[in-house]
Image: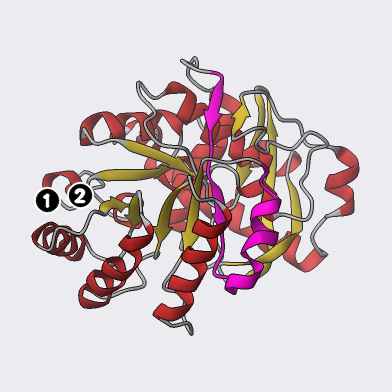
């Protein structure tokens, strides 16, 4: 059952949290938090996402606060560190925020940077953590030729996998094929091609990836993400969408409920924030986050409250996206 918009508005808090380093081109992350009868939910689609796409994010928010999560199969979730597209000399500083980790995701293919910058950054991670599993994330920023060249260069450092090296499913399949032909030992992971497609299972049917990256909010919630992973039949990595601890709690619920969890999850991104909205942030301890509930702190909600005009922008967005869900009935809660 979809809660009434008045109920959502009454519980809404809009905050703007400072980042330690630039991520996705921003130094502050705005998000809207809602408190339901079963806990807190987070609604934080990036500003460029339209209302239809944002409806899945609101569906996930409502699941967290009003419907609840499935029973966990595990209570400790291994996580990777995340290194944004910083200069190589800043890599040790970024890694220091995560404590001990066994896996690191490195952002590559940043607009305005060159392959040299990517190689230097990945080498800096390898030098800092000689035994860590390293995966790179291009966010679809390369073309096929660029991806094959870049991954060939980066593979000498030792890569666990490359996340969304090119934007399209057809491109992923081509990159995967060419890496195989050249015996380049890099697996291909699909991220945006899973969560932005009308049919997220096309990746599996096209043989375009060795594994998939799943994010709770963009897929419409934990239950829907579990169904997609089951139907895809591919190993899954659970990742975040630059969430506060409230959103990370939903990602942990998915990771905890998956039948198997072969890779460290990209759920350690709270360490990229200068502050969180809870006094007990969901950050890694010895390479893992332990499953626990998250409660937003009233003082922090007030301290980081967004300016009035931004609060109004988010509340109007909430009204519009709620309307999308209302017109769709319960489809986004049940369809895969």
Q: Residue at x 36, y 31 (%)?
A: 262
Q: Find disc 2 in the rendering and name its residue.
A: 203
Badge 1 local density, few (<14 within 10 Å), some, or many (20+)?
A: few
- Number of numbered discs visible in the structure rendering: 2
Give x and y (percent) for residue 255.
46, 29
Give x and y (percent) for residue 50.
46, 63
Q: Find disc 1 in the rendering and name its residue.
A: 206
Q: Quadrant of residue 222?
A: top left
Q: Nearer the viewer, residue 27 or 309?
A: 27
Give the distance between the C-alpha atoms of the residues marked 2 and 1, in whole angstroms. Answer: 5 Å
SS for tag 2? helix
Contact between marks 2 and 1 (CB within 8 A): the answer is yes
- The magenta stretch spans which residues? 75-99
Q: Residue at x 18, y 49 (%)?
A: 202
Q: Is residue 97 shown in magenta?
A: yes
**282, above or below 136, in the image:** above
Using the rendered image of the protein, determine whether residue 4 is visible from the camera's viewpoint.
Answer: no
**148, above or below 289, in the image:** below
């Amino acid at each position: 059952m979809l809660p009434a918009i008045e109920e959502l508005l009454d519980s809404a808090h809009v905050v703007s949290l400072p980042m330690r380093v630039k991520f996705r081109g921003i130094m502050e992350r705005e998000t809207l938090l809602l408190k339901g009868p079963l806990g807190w939910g987070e609604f934080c689609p990036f500003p460029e996402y339209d209302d239809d796409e944002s409806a899945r994010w609101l569906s996930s928010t409502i699941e967290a606060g009003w419907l609840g999560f499935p029973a966990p199969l595990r209570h400790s979730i291994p996580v990777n560190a995340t290194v944004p597209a910083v200069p190589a000399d800043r890599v040790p500083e970024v890694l220091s925020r995560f404590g001990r980790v066994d896996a690191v995701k490195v952002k590559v293919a940043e607009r305005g940077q060159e392959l040299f910058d990517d190689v230097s950054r990945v080498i800096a991670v390898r030098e800092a953590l000689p035994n860590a599993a390293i995966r790179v994330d291009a966010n679809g920023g390369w073309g096929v030729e660029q991806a094959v060249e870049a991954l060939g260069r980066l593979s000498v450092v030792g890569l666990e996998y490359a996340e969304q090296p090119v934007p399209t499913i057809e491109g992923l399949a081509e990159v995967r094929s060419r890496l195989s032909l050249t015996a380049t030992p890099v697996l291909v992971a699909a991220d945006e091609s899973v969560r932005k497609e009308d049919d997220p299972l096309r990746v599996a049917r096209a043989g375009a990836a060795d594994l998939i990256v799943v994010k709770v909010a963009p897929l419409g919630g934990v239950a829907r993400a579990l169904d997609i992973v089951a139907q895809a039949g591919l190993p899954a990595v659970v990742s975040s969408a630059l969430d506060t601890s409230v959103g990370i709690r939903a990602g942990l619920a998915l990771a905890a409920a998956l039948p198997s969890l072969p890779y460290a999850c990209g759920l350690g991104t709270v360490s990229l924030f200068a502050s969180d909205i809870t006094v007990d942030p969901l950050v890694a301890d010895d390479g893992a986050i332990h499953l626990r509930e998250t409660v937003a702190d009233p003082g922090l909600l007030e301290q980081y409250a967004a300016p009035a005009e931004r609060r109004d922008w988010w509340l109007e967005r909430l009204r519009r996206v709620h309307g999308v869900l209302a017109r769709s009935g319960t489809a986004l809660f049940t369809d895969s």
